[in-house]
Image: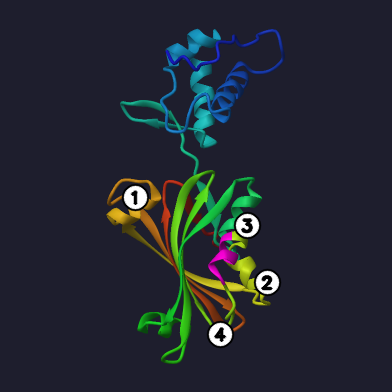
Amino acid sequence: MSDSVIIEKIRKDIPLALYFQLKEKIKDNILSGKWAEGSKIPSEQEICDIYGVSRITVRKAIEELQNEKYLIKRQGRGTFVQKKTIDQKLHKFYSFSEELKSLGLKEYSNVLEFERQTANVIVRDTLHLEEGEEVFRIKRLRFVDEKPYALEQSFIPVRFVPELTGEQIQEKGLYKSLNSYGVFLDRAIETFSAVNLSKNEAEKLQVAYKTAAISLIRETYRGTDIVEYCISLVRGDIFHYSVELK
């Protein structure tokens, strides 16, 4: 039996269903971190013994916590605390950082590389640039609650923000830095595909080599101008995307 379990009997003298009381106690163990993400929880019999309830009560509580994405059952292995994932709904223009902060999560990014260069053919064609035009290439590693969740590379035409610096982006973020120069983005086109991470990419995202990830290519607009061409690799165990169809 895990040493981290709170040993506390369920009260039978109050008008709250036993399974509901048990469910809340298990949820408290998860939310407080006593039962860590990905860890195996005690067996049904152990939970019965800890809280003084029947197996029917335990099964009902666990079933509801599965439906609410707190727990997950793995055939032949037991029940585990579900790892947190973030659902990004694709029905409006969004900023990763603003969306995550609105959920109460700590989000930040580290600028790994910042340079001014002549756009290559792919970048030039995507951003509709003239031959020889320059872009800022910005490579960032993004974190949520201290975990790296995305590795991304953005290309911004120099003519839109010639005074842009890596220090500004590190301090304010990319979009807020653009806003400070009067460049406000209003829509984006995104393309998704599944990829396996290279050794270098996996090391930066702190996952195993060849782990599956989401490849996200974004073209971000101000009116009819494409201001950003961004290539991101996003950890699928932290982020997932959903689309509402009407």
For badge 3, the amino acid type reads Glu
Task: Compute the Cα span from label 4 to label 3.
Answer: 26 Å
Q: Nearer the viewer, residue 18 or 246?
A: 18
Q: Alpha-carbon neighbours of circle 2 within 10 Å: few (<14), some, or many (≥20)?
A: few
The location of residue 245, given as percent across then percent down, is 54, 62
Q: Estimate the spatial distance between the alpha carbons at disc 1 and disc 2, rounded to whole Å.
A: 34 Å
Q: CA distance from mark 2 to mark 4?
A: 15 Å
Residue 74: percent from left, percent from top: 36, 31
Q: Residue 150 at x, y = what percent? A: 45, 56
The secondary structure type at the circle numbered 3 is: helix
- Identified at 29% across, 57% down, the residue is 198
Q: Which numbered disc, 4 or 3, marks the residue that appears first in the sequence?
A: 3
Element marked by disc 1? helix
Residue at 41%, 80% (x, y): give it.
Answer: 123
Q: How is the image coloured?
A: rainbow
Is residue 166 a member of the stretch shown in magenta? yes
Whichever of labels 2 and 4 marks the residue nearer the N terminus, that label is: 4
Quickly name the residue at label 4: 159
Q: Which numbered tag is attached to residue 244? A: none
Whether the residues at callouts 1 and 3 have beta carbons within 8 Å, the answer is no
Which of pointers 4 and 3 indicates the residue nearer the eye? 4
Is 238 or 45 nearer to us in this picture?
A: 238
Q: Which residues are magenta?
A: 165-170
Residue hosting label 3: 98
**Disc with the residue nearer the chain's start (2 vs 3):** 3
Disc 2 target residue = 180
Which sits earlier in the primary sequence, circle 1 or circle 2?
A: 2
Figure quadrant of the C terminus: bottom right
In this rendering, the label closer to the viewer, 1 or 3: 1
Type of amino acid at the residue the image marks with label 1: Glu
